[in-house]
Image (cartoon, rainbow, N blue to C red):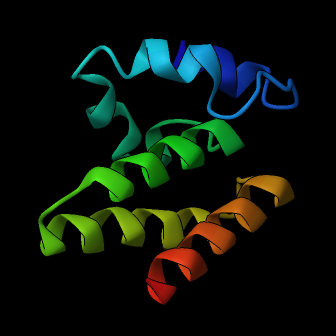
Amino acid sequence: MLRWFETHWESDVSSPGPFVHFIEEFPDYVQHLENPCAMELTRQTVLMVNRIVNIERDLNGVAYWVSLMQEAAGHPLADISCKELAQEFVAYQASI
């Protein structure tokens, strides 16, 4: 499913939408989001990382996931909308 997001990054499937909710039912999806170099960065994958930050209770975990979003915001292979969304989420997380 994550590969589908990579291939169809321009598709609007709502946010977060049923696809994201479906993926989140499988605990191993998290490990696929941890390596931005192993996958294409998309708005949906950045959104999913932000959702993890929102439920993370450990401050080290929050810092880790926010750092991944910061990496996405500057990643040379990410499209501009993905970078912008990552920047918005990083700014939001810094403000709370």
Q: Specify the farthest residue to the bottom.
A: 95
Up-down: is 87 above or below 20?
Answer: below
Q: In this view, does 93 lie to the left or right of 57?
A: right
Q: x%, y% of residue 56? A: 23, 56
Quadrant location of the C terminus?
A: bottom left
Can residue 74 be seen from the camera position used here? no
Q: In this view, does 4 lie to the left or right of 35?
A: right
Identify the residue at horizontal 77%, vertical 21% (top origin).
13
Quadrant location of the N terminus?
A: top right
Identify the residue at horizontal 67%, vertical 72% (top origin).
88
Q: Is residue 20 left or right of residue 34?
A: right
Tally the marks: 0
Q: x%, y% of residue 11? A: 86, 24
Can residue 50 be seen from the camera position used here? yes
Q: x%, y% of residue 48? A: 49, 41
Q: x%, y% of residue 47? A: 57, 46
